[in-house]
């Protein structure tokens, strides 16, 4: 079974409001698993949670701002991956052209 941490533990460890955690989940910024009515965050998703928490509490960015920033960073990552794919294809095409 994958490692996970309960919402209650996160709230206590990170000293955040439980409503903030729930808002992150409701907005789709965090994906959780529920087991016996207990909400869990997978350890692999902790970096996203920590980043969003830091932005909110340290930089005073509200939930709509977090959604925009998160969406823009996701689009940048998608574009970076697409660019890498295209560069690889171009490299293959260029290699074939030079061979022929």
Image: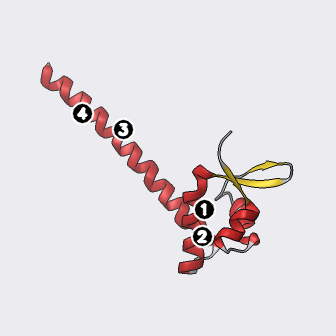
* Residue identified by numbered label 2: 53
Taking the image as shown, residue 63 lies to the left or right of residue 38, namely left
Specify the quadrant of the image occupied by residue 88.
top left
Find the distance from the CA under tag 1 to the CA under tag 3. 29 Å
Cα separation, mark 1 vs mark 4, equals 37 Å
Q: Residue at x 55, y 73 (%)?
A: 55
Label 1: how many residues lie within 10 Å, few (<14), some (14-19) or many (20+)? some
Pointer 1 residue: 49
Spot occupied by residue 75 in the image (x, y as percentages of width and height): 48, 54
C-alpha separation, residue under disc 3 versus residue under disc 4: 10 Å
Counting from the top left corner in percent of width and height, residue 9 is at: 72, 63
Q: Residue at x 73, y 53 (%)?
A: 40
SS for callout 2: helix
Sequence-earlier tag: 1 or 4: 1
**SS for dot 1:** helix
- Where does label 4 land, which residue? 91
User: In front: 57, or 38?
Assistant: 38
Question: Quick one: label 2 or label 4, which is nearer the N terminus?
Answer: 2
Tell me the mark number nearer the camera, choosing from 1 and 3: 1
Q: Which mark is residue 85?
A: 3
Query: How many numbered marks, from 0 up?
Result: 4
Residue 44, image x, y percentages? 58, 50
């Amino acid at each position: 079974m994958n490692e996970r941490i309960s919402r209650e533990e996160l709230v206590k460890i990170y000293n955040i409001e439980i409503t903030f955690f729930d808002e992150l989940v409701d907005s789709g910024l965090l994906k959780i698993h529920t087991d016996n009515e207990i909400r869990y965050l997978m350890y692999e998703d902790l970096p996203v949670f920590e980043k969003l928490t830091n932005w909110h509490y340290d930089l005073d960015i509200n939930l709509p701002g977090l959604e925009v920033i998160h969406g823009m960073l996701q689009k940048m990552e998608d574009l970076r991956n697409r660019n890498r794919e295209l560069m690889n294809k171009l490299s293959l095409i260029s290699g074939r052209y030079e061979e022929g």
